[in-house]
């Protein structure tokens, strides 16, 4: 009974952590092969068939290890550091943002987009990002989030404007953070977008807001996917959706201020008339 209980708990935990449909199909196929190999070895005297199935399971195991090397590395890191709350998908209170923070963030992103100031904002919603998860952990800020502070951090010719800003809950944790780059679509996107894709590929409870310095385009990266272009109002809706999904309680539907609405209008008009161009490859992270 204990054996069945532990195996069931492990299976439920594994399947609950997989959200990508194709990944789930691969996992189901792999488990089917493992089960078939066990049944053949346990109940049938078919030595040749058993050897072939074992070789197939070994080949699939190596293939999955290569495909999921990032996820396996992350699993070993979580087990080694004892961060079981992240592994079990239970975000702590420090990751829960209120509606005011979400509105201020979308407002700041809209203003940065209007002024074509390059920006990269990382929202930790339960991945518990640590300094060792970045190429450079940046400069500690540990300040209450505000639109004015975020705009100042990304002001031109300031020491921290080239890196990313890390936000947990309602606080700005650090600025000038250098993120690992993604290897996908290298020729299509600039380094800011590659950095956003890279960090969200490794951590599933983490999203990135990107503002292009060349075009002012607003983008949102989540689980290695990039949605662009979006308006500040669309960004607000997405942030509320992600925050409610991560906390399970939802974010209150506080109406936007007049400033946030007016900031989204010029960007909406620019989207309909301007043809998008990829960021310059020389843009810094």
Image (spheres, rainbow, N blue to C red):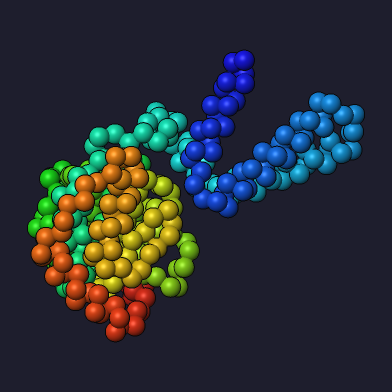
Front residue of 267/64: it is 267
Task: Please tell me how many numbered marks the rendered image carries.
Answer: 0
Q: Quadrant of the N terminus?
A: top right
Asked if residue 209 lies left or right of residue 256, the reply is right
Q: Residue at x 42, y 32 (%)?
A: 88
Q: Is residue 146 above or below residue 91?
A: below
Residue 21 in the image: state x and y as whole percent: 55, 51
- Judge left or right: residue 65 versus residue 174: right
The quarter holding residue 211 reads bottom left
Question: Residue 64: percent from the left, percent from the top?
Answer: 62, 46
When asked about the image quadrant of residue 217, the answer is bottom left
Q: Quadrant of the C terminus?
A: bottom left
Query: What residue appears at the point 35 percent right and 79 percent down from the top-left corner?
Result: 277
Residue 72 is at least partly visible in this image: yes
* Up-down relation of residue 126 to residue 238 (above or below): above
Asked if residue 133 shows in the view, the reply is no
Q: Who's the residue at 24% across and 64% down the image?
A: 233
Relative to residue 104, is residue 129 depicted above or below? above
At horizontal 83% and vertical 41% (from top left) the residue drawn is 52
Residue at the extreme top? 1
Whole-percent x, y for residue 250 in the image: 28, 44
Where is residue 26 drawn, in percent x and y?
63, 48
In the image, residue 194 above or below residue 11: below
Q: Quadrant of residue 275?
A: bottom left
């Amino acid at each position: 009974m204990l054996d069945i209980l532990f195996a069931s708990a492990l299976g439920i935990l594994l399947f609950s952590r997989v959200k990508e449909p194709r990944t789930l199909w691969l996992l189901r196929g792999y488990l089917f092969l493992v089960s078939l190999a066990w049944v053949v070895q346990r109940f049938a005297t078919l030595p040749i068939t058993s050897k072939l199935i074992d070789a197939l399971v070994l080949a699939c195991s190596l293939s999955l290890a290569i495909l999921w090397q990032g996820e396996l590395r992350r699993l070993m890191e979580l087990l080694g550091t004892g961060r079981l709350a992240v592994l079990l998908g239970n975000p702590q209170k420090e990751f829960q943002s209120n509606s005011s923070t979400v509105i201020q963030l979308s407002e700041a992103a809209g203003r940065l987009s209007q002024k074509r100031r390059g920006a990269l904002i990382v929202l930790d919603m339960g991945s518990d990002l640590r300094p060792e998860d970045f190429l450079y952990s940046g400069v500690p800020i540990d300040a209450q989030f505000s639109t004015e502070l975020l705009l100042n951090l990304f002001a031109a010719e300031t020491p921290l404007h080239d890196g990313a800003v890390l936000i947990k809950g309602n606080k700005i944790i650090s600025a000038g953070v250098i993120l690992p780059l993604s290897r996908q679509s290298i020729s299509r996107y600039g380094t800011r977008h590659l950095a956003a894709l890279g960090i969200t590929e490794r951590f599933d409870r983490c999203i990135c807001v990107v503002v292009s310095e060349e075009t002012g385009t607003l983008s949102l990266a989540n689980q290695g996917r990039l949605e662009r272009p979006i308006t500040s109002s669309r960004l607000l809706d997405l942030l509320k959706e992600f925050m409610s999904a991560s906390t399970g309680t939802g974010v209150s539907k506080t109406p936007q201020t007049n400033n946030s609405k007016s900031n989204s209008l010029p960007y909406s008009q620019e989207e309909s008339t301007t043809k998008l161009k990829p960021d310059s490859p020389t843009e810094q992270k």
